[in-house]
Image (cartoon, rainbow, N blue to C red):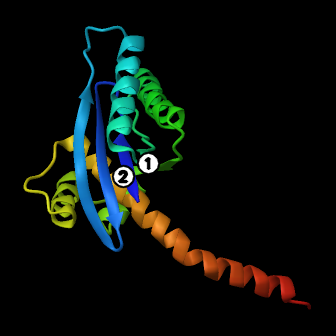
Amino acid sequence: MRVLGIDPGSRITGYGIVDQQGSRLVHVDNGAIFTDSAVDFPGRLKRIFDGLSEVIATYRPEEVAVENVFFATNPQSALKLGQARGAAIVAAVHAGLPVAEYTALQVKQAVVGQGRAAKEQVQKMLKALLGLPEVAQADASDALAVAICHINSRGLAQKAAPFSSKRAASWRSYKP
C-alpha cells in the first residue's frame, strides 16, 4: 500500500510518500510545495492544488492522509490554514483517493509513542524508521509522519475488526 501524507500550510505544504511492504515501511519520496507570498491567496491555493495533483500523478498513492491542524494564533491564520487544507483535500478527492485526517497528537503517538513528543524526536524517529540518510525538511517530516500514522492506524483497525464483529455477535446473542 502506498500512502501520501500531507502537512498543509498556506506558505509551505509538506508531502511524504511511504509504502507499506508487509510489516516494512519504505520511504518513497518527500518534499514541500512552496507558495509565493507575493501571489494573491487564491493563486497560492491553486499552487497547492496543482503541486499535490502533480505529486499524486507521479507517485500514484492508494490513500491520502492529511494532518488535521488545530493551531490558531489568530482567526485570519486559522482561516488561511483551513483553506490550504481544503486545497490539499480537494486535490486528493479530485484524483479519486480516500482521505483520512489525523491530529498532531495522533501522529506523534503513532510515530514516537508519545503524543507530546518534540518535533526533533519525531524527525529522529522518522530517520530511523525509514532509513533516511538525513532528517527531512520540517514540513516534509511532518507529512511523512502523517503517512506512517495512517499506515499504523489502518493496520490496527484491520486487526481490531474481527474482535469488534465477534463482540457485536456476542452482544446480539445475549439475552437477559
Q: Which quadrant, please, contains the N terminus?
A: bottom left
Q: Where does the image place residue 73, in percent across and percent down from the top left?
A: 37, 31
Which quadrant holds residue 107? bottom left
Q: Is residue 108 above or below residue 83?
A: below
The numbered dot on residue 27 is none
Amino acid at circle 1: Ala
The 10 Å Cα crowd at callout 2, few under 14, some 14 to 19, many 20 or more, is: many
Image quarter where the C terminus lies is: bottom right
Q: Residue at x 62, y 80 (%)?
A: 162
Q: Position of residue 81 (x, y in %)?
A: 41, 29
Q: Is residue 70 left or right of residue 94?
A: left
From the top left corner, tell me how far across and down residue 125 is, in percent.
20, 63
Compared with 122, 13 (above or below) is: above
Q: Tell me the CA gap for discs 1 and 2.
A: 6 Å
Rendered residue at 21%/66% (across/down) = 129
Query: Residue at horizontal 29%, vertical 46%?
Result: 16
From the viewer's perspective, tell me whether residue 70 is left or right of residue 108.
right
Residue under pointer 1: 65
Task: State the image coordinates of residue 99 (x, y, percent, origin top left).
Answer: 51, 46
Which residue is more in the foreground, 41 or 69? 41
Residue farthest right in this picture: 176
Residue 75: quadrant of the picture: top left
Which disc number belongs to residue 146? 2
Visible residue check, residue 115: no
Closer to the chain start, of discs 1 and 2, is 1
Residue 86, above or below 15 = above
Residue at 91 percent across and 90 percent down: it is 175
Helix, strand or loop status at disc 2 = helix
Q: Secondary structure at mark 1?
A: strand
**Residues tagged 1 and 2 counted as in contact (Cβ below 8 A):** yes
